[in-house]
């Protein structure tokens, strides 16, 4: 289950005009990764995700948040060193694909991108968060 091991810990999250925290832990005998995200500024909201790696090697994540969002993602580590979770089909009223990309992964931080696509191949960046390990 090392695919998301880099994500474990307490994080300070910053983005253009905002900041928050994220705490990511292992649970259920190490088989489940639980994320608790808190956006503090400028629009406070909280979110929770649960991620597991299936016997097929594919990672699956369920996300819910205080705005009423619910999404299911699938993905895993990529050859370019990123870790990608994406909706397997278009979602929401907009009927777009959504994905998150973890990149520039190091011991004390990484970059996270939230992206949208009409066709699942051309992606538009919507939100970038810089993660730094909390001390």
Image (cartoon, rainbow, N blue to C red):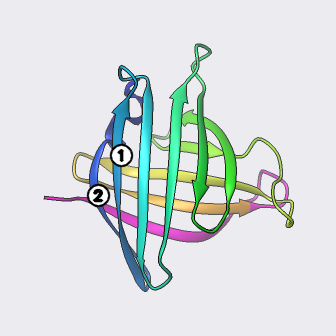
- Expressed as whole percent of the image width and height from the top left, the position of residue 120 reads 79, 51
- Expressed as whole percent of the image width and height from the top left, the position of residue 64 reads 60, 53
Nearest the viewer among 5 and 72 is: 72
Horizontal side of residue 52 vs 98, given as left or right: left
Looking at the figure, which quarter contains the C terminus? bottom left
The structure residue drawn at horizontal position 37% and vertical position 66%, both measured from the top left corner, is: 130
Question: Where does label 1 land, which residue?
Answer: 24
Numbered badge on residue 11: 2
- Expressed as whole percent of the image width and height from the top left, the position of residue 78 reads 53, 36
Quadrant location of residue 65?
bottom right
Q: Can residue 80 be seen from the camera position used here? A: yes
The structure residue drawn at horizontal position 56% and vertical position 44%, both measured from the top left corner, is: 84
Horizontal side of residue 75 vs 27, given as left or right: right
User: Is 123 part of what is drawn in magenta?
Assistant: yes
Q: Within 10 angstroms of label 1, few (less than 14), some, or many (20 or more) residues?
A: many
Q: Can residue 78 be seen from the camera position used here? A: no
Q: What stretch is highlighted in magenta?
A: 117-135
Nearest the viewer among 127 and 67 is: 67
CA distance separating discs 1 and 2: 8 Å
Q: Is residue 54 above or below residue 36?
A: above
The structure residue drawn at horizontal position 61% and vertical position 36%, both measured from the top left corner, is: 75
- Expressed as whole percent of the image width and height from the top left, the position of residue 19 reads 37, 76
Q: Within 10 angstroms of label 2, few (less than 14), some, or many (20 or more) residues?
A: many
Q: Is residue 3 above or below residue 99?
A: above
Nearest the viewer among 126 and 72 is: 72
Looking at the figure, which quarter contains the N terminus? top left
Numbered badge on residue 5: none
- Circle 2 sits in a helix, a strand or a loop, which is it? strand
Which one is earlier in the sequence, the residue at label 1 or at label 2?
2
The answer to the question of whether label 1 and label 2 lie on touching residues, with beta carbons closer than 8 A, is yes
Quadrant location of residue 8?
top left
- Circle 1 sits in a helix, a strand or a loop, which is it? strand
């Amino acid at each position: 289950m090392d695919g998301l091991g880099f994500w474990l810990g307490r994080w300070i999250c910053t983005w253009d005009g905002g900041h928050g925290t994220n705490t990511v832990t292992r649970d259920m005998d190490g088989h489940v990764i639980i994320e608790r995200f808190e956006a503090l500024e400028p629009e406070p909201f909280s979110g929770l995700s649960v991620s597991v790696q299936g016997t097929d090697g594919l990672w699956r994540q369920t996300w819910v948040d205080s705005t009423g969002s619910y999404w299911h993602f699938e993905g895993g580590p990529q050859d370019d060193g990123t870790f990608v979770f994406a909706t397997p089909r278009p979602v929401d009223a907009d009927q777009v694909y959504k994905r998150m990309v973890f990149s520039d992964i190091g011991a004390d931080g990484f970059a996270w991108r939230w992206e949208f696509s009409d066709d699942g191949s051309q992606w538009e960046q919507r939100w970038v968060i810089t993660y730094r390990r909390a001390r």
